[in-house]
Image (cartoon, rainbow, N blue to C red):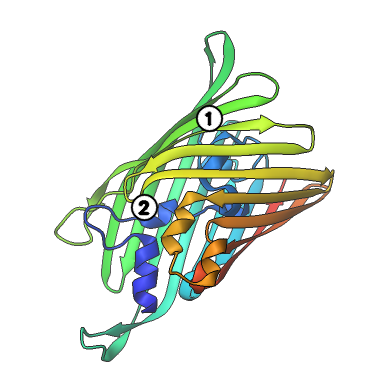
Amino acid sequence: MNTLILLLFLGFPGESFSYGYLLIPFGTDGAVFRSALVSDPSSDFSTYYNPSFGLNSRIATFFSSYLVGTKYGGILFTPSRDLTAGVLFFSSGEQDEVTYEGVKVGTYSSTYMALFAGKVLPLDYFGKRAISGFSGKLLYQSIADRKSLAVAIDAGGHIPVNEKILIGASIRNLGVEVKRFYEKAYFPPPSISVGGRVRISGKFQLLFSTGFEVTYGPVFDAGLKVTPLDLLVVEAGYSLKGRELNTGSNLDILNGFATGITLKVKNLRVSYSVLPMGELGLTHYIGVVYR
């Protein structure tokens, strides 16, 4: 059962698309807002969702103990001005290998990784200062003795409407498999997101996005970021995708919701987020950012 849960959330095997780990929340902010980060330049993890955002930090990292003991994390850093690079990784550890009759015949491990780099490109659009960006990805999967490689690209842009409103959009994971896992070719899961950030006041920001994921369908993410103190940020969000975890239990009411907190100390930021996943339990994210 653990193996089935893991493969379900990593998106393998599917009808045509694999590499589903690319759609799992990235970063502590991503755990709360998901694709709503497509319009948030203040986040240290938003460049993963929209490559038109450069990093606000020198290095940003996060780690999560994901489902069934899977180790999951990522690193973002800035090689030079307007350039970003990073890595995303999963490691399942040892999993039981069983026959169709449920008999254990051994163990195996699985590893998933994405290496990516992007560039921010300023441009003028209808007299306003807009920003575009592109990134490329090298994707790797390994389950037992089988391995695959794929390449993909992301593209995004954002533009300020006025001092309070910013609009962002991105297309992610357009790619192809170059070394097949099986005889049949699999593809990264394309997604498109369009969203906005509204500054309600100096302390409140509303984020929202809508879009489409090929392996899931229509998605909607939204959340509120509150800064009650200069050294404290509190976040709360909701994702429509949380409904896929509904099992009819009393815990279903929490599915889709997430919350997080960030403490700022000089150039250091330490953040923690928690993502309820119904009967599967809570997923915890810890992030450390150096600016």
Q: Could you give the CA–CA distance between mark 2 and mark 1, rounded to whole angstroms?
A: 25 Å
Residue drawn at point x = 57 percent, y = 50 percent: 238
Name the amino acid type tagged 2. Answer: Leu
Residue drawn at point x = 54 percent, y = 69 percent: 251
Residue drawn at point x = 30 percent, y = 50 percent: 150
Residue receiving disc 2: 139
Label 1 neighbour load within 10 Å: few <14, some 14-19, many 20+: many
Q: Could you tell whether 164 is left or right of 278 in the image?
A: right
Q: Secondary structure at mark 1?
A: strand
Label 2 neighbour load within 10 Å: few <14, some 14-19, many 20+: many
Q: Secondary structure at mark 2?
A: strand
Residue drawn at point x = 34 percent, y = 59 percent: 11
Residue receiving disc 1: 168
Q: Is residue 214 above or below residue 181?
A: above
Q: Could you tell whether 238 is left or right of 191 in the image?
A: right
In terms of depth relative to the viewer, which is nearer, 210 or 264?
210
User: Can I make out residue 84 in this image?
Assistant: no
* Residue 18: % across, % down: 30, 56
User: Can I make out residue 7 in this image?
Assistant: yes
* Residue 287: % across, % down: 66, 57
- Kindly indicate the quadrant of the structure image that contains residue 14: bottom left
- Kindly indicate the quadrant of the structure image that contains residue 213: top left
* Residue 112: % across, % down: 40, 62
Q: Could you tell whether 29 is left or right of 243 in the image?
A: right
Say which label, 2 or 1, has the lower sequence index: 2
